[in-house]
Image: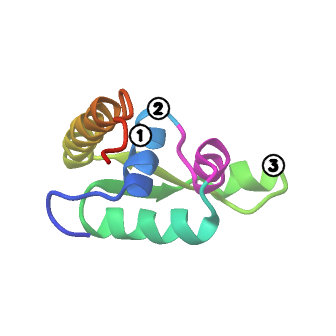
Amino acid sequence: MGKGYLSFSVAVILQALANGYQYGFDIMDITGLPSGTVYPALRRLEMAGLVRSKWEKHTIAQEEQRPPRKYYELTKQGHEALAEAVKRYRLLEQSMIINDAEPKPASS
């Protein structure tokens, strides 16, 4: 994960975390991204310091008869990276709209 550049799927994962979706399955559900994209990205984001994680208490998972969940949240750096990505993708979207405004007639 290079400094200053986040892929669109990674930016979407950060946005999901910023919107309160905290564990992998929820992120997959809301974004439509597969587990093979979400979980490796979360690991890379954590190693880069953009995300931190913690396991829920084992007793909660036991009461609900399921495996414990690993919860993720954005760090300060994660919020900053998301803001930059949103700005970058917004500019890209605007340039695509401008460039796609009206097709030009074919020249002869």
Residue matched to label 2: 19
Circles 2 and 1: CB distance less than 8 Å?
yes
Q: Is residue 103 above or below residue 22?
A: above
Q: Is residue 50 above or below residue 36?
A: above
Q: Is residue 69 above or below residue 16?
A: below
Q: CA distance from mark 3 to mark 2?
A: 27 Å
Question: What range is drawn magenta here?
Answer: 21-32
Q: Is residue 69 left or right of residue 74?
A: right
The front one of 82 and 26 is 82
Q: Position of residue 90 (x, y in %)?
A: 28, 34
Task: Identify the residue at image location x=39%, y=53%.
Answer: 8
Q: Position of residue 99 (x, y in %)?
A: 29, 36
Residue matched to label 3: 63
**Amino acid, disc 2:** Asn
Q: Earlier in the sequence, mark 3 or mark 1?
A: 1
Let me know if residue 49 is in the magenta part.
no
Numbered circle sitting on residue 15: 1
SS for dot 2:
loop
Q: Residues within 10 Å of mark 2 (few under 14, many from 20)?
A: few
Let me know if residue 22 is in the magenta part.
yes
Q: CA distance from mark 2 to mark 1?
A: 6 Å
